[in-house]
Image: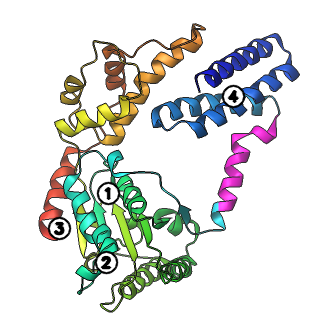
Amino acid sequence: MSELEKIAIAKAREAVMLDQRGSKAEAVAKYREAVQILSRLISLTDSPIIKAVYKEKLSKYLDRLAELGEENYSKEGMSRETSSKYEKETLTVERPQITWSDVIGLDDAKQAIRESIVYPRLRPDLFPLGWPNGILLFGPPGCGKTLLVGATANEIDATLYTLDAAQVMSKWLGESEKNIADLFNKARRDASTGKPVIIFIDEVDSLATMYQVEVGGEARARNQLLKEMDGIASKNRRDYLYVIAATNKPWLLDEPFIRRFQKRIYVRHPDTNTRRLILEHYTKNLKLDRDVDLSLLASETEGYSASDLYAICLDAHMATVREMFENELNEPRPINLADFRASLIKRKPSIIKENLRKYEEWYQRYGAV
């Protein structure tokens, strides 16, 4: 990969130089080569931070190709194609590569999910009363709800259907209930073969919110979801079909919907020790200067989510990569403490303290781990 990186840098430099000279055809050819190599690097790397760096550069070169009239390389064109494909489907089928080691902290949540999903899959004979089929994950945004779902699906080798509730309501209002029914019917067919199936509904409050005045389509979509949830919660069912829903606003959910989930798990924001572990996880493949103290950074990032911490590591790394490109160096310098602190100045914590109290109150009332 280091050789590919060097080739990509060389191609990009040539492209920029030719572009500045006005040699459009030659510049386009070099931009194309850089795009192809960066696309290859993105597919090869496992590091989300390095992958994001490659994607930023790829986006820059795609923009320039579009400006030069290369429509086939237009991000807008790519977005239209992706959007068209998505509008034909109501869900995405995924093969997650996330493992439990990627989920830092959240031990209570991980244990509750293992007891509900992993253990029954391993030893169904130990569960004569059945097992929970509905799990609700709630908590601040960016704290690991989606990672938990991916790791669970990977652990039991499940087919994972991901449904974005907000997009369903906005794009298919009037057809929402049909799409929800189609989703569950397909999942049931898959589960009938003995294959574990997880339906993950993100931003579920978009479908299950307490409306004072609601449009008919919204009510029908919610009622269809409730009906489907009742179907999979039957005491006589012994298949491996699960619904996992996630929300950042559990207090908006109505009572009938809440009752459909036997497990309601609070995915908490990271404490100081967890923040240190998260920082260690995201920087393990990065070159750090000796002055970088991750324990100190963890103590300075109160209120930052796991997603925020990833973004901080990405900012710090990209600062060194930017210097490398601008100064035409072969390798980026080690990341120092100042790089992290520069990111902290620009990037404020996303967790709202007032909402933490609301999460705790909701958990005390409805929590079921």
The vertical placement of 142 against 149, above or below, is above
Mark 2 and mark 3 lie on one chain; the one further toward the N terminus is 2
Question: Which residue is the site of mark 1?
Answer: 248
The answer to whether marks 1 and 3 mark residues whose Cβ atoms lie closer than 8 Å is no
Residue 81 vs residue 104: left or right?
right
Q: Secondary structure at mark 4?
A: helix
Question: Which residue is the site of mark 3?
Answer: 367
Residue 343, disc: none
Q: Secondary structure at mark 3?
A: loop
Q: In the image, what residue type sits under mark 3?
A: Gly
Q: Secondary structure at mark 2?
A: helix
The answer to whether marks 3 and 4 mark residues whose Cβ atoms lie closer than 8 Å is no
Mark 3 and mark 4 lie on one chain; the one further toward the N terminus is 4
Q: Which residues are magenta?
A: 70-85
**Residue sitting at x 18%, y 41%:** 271
Question: Which residue is the site of mark 2?
Answer: 257
Of 25 and 153, nearer the camera is 153
Q: In the rendered structure, does residue 322 fall within the stretch colored magenta? A: no
The quarter holding residue 61 reads top right
Mark 1 and mark 3 lie on one chain; the one further toward the N terminus is 1
Question: Which residue is the site of mark 4?
Answer: 61
